[in-house]
Amino acid sequence: MSDCKCECKYEKIFTEEETEGMAWLDRVLEAVCEKGPNHRSFKKALAAAQAINKMEQHRHELHCAAHGLEERIMMFVHAQMHSMPEGQA
C-alpha cells in the first residue's frame, strides 16, 4: 500500500453506469441492514463493494506514483537546464 499523503483535490466524474451501480449498492445496503446477511443479494453486494474498494486502492496507488514521477521529471528538467551552457537554456 502506498504512503502517499498528498493533499491534492480532484473532481471525480462518475459515468451513468457508475452512478447506477452506487445507487444499487445503496439499495442493497438498506435491505441488508433491514434483513441481515440472509438477504439474497448480500454476497453480490459484498463482492461488488470489495471490488470497488480494491479498484479505488489501485487508483490511489497510481495517483501517488504519478506524483513521484512528476517530481522526478521536474528534478531532471531542472538539472538539465542548469547544466546547459549559458544562452542555450
Image (cartoon, rainbow, N blue to C red):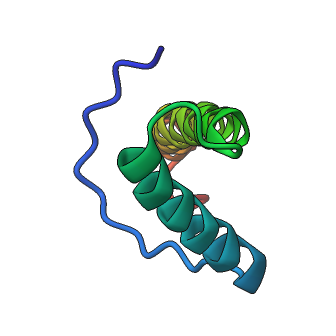
Give me the residue at 55% from left, 57% from top. 28
Give me the residue at 62% from left, 77% from top. 19
Q: Nearer the viewer, residue 51 or 11?
A: 51
Q: Answer above or below: position of 75 versus 11.
A: above
Residue 53 placement (x, y as % from top left): 55, 37
Give me the residue at 34% from left, 19% from top. 3
64 left or right of 9? Answer: right
Q: How many circles with numbers are drawn on the protein?
A: 0
Residue 68 placement (x, y as % from top left): 48, 32
Locate the C terminus by quadrant: bottom right
Residue 63 placement (x, y as % from top left): 53, 43
- Outermost residue on the top side: it is 1
75 left or right of 42? Answer: left
Q: Answer above or below: position of 65 versus 40.
A: above
Give me the residue at 55% from left, 44% from top. 77
- The answer to whether residue 37 shows anywhere in this view is yes
Q: Which image quadrant for residue 61?
A: top right
Residue 35 placement (x, y as % from top left): 45, 46
Q: Answer above or below: position of 51 versus 11.
A: above
- The answer to whether residue 82 shows anywhere in this view is no
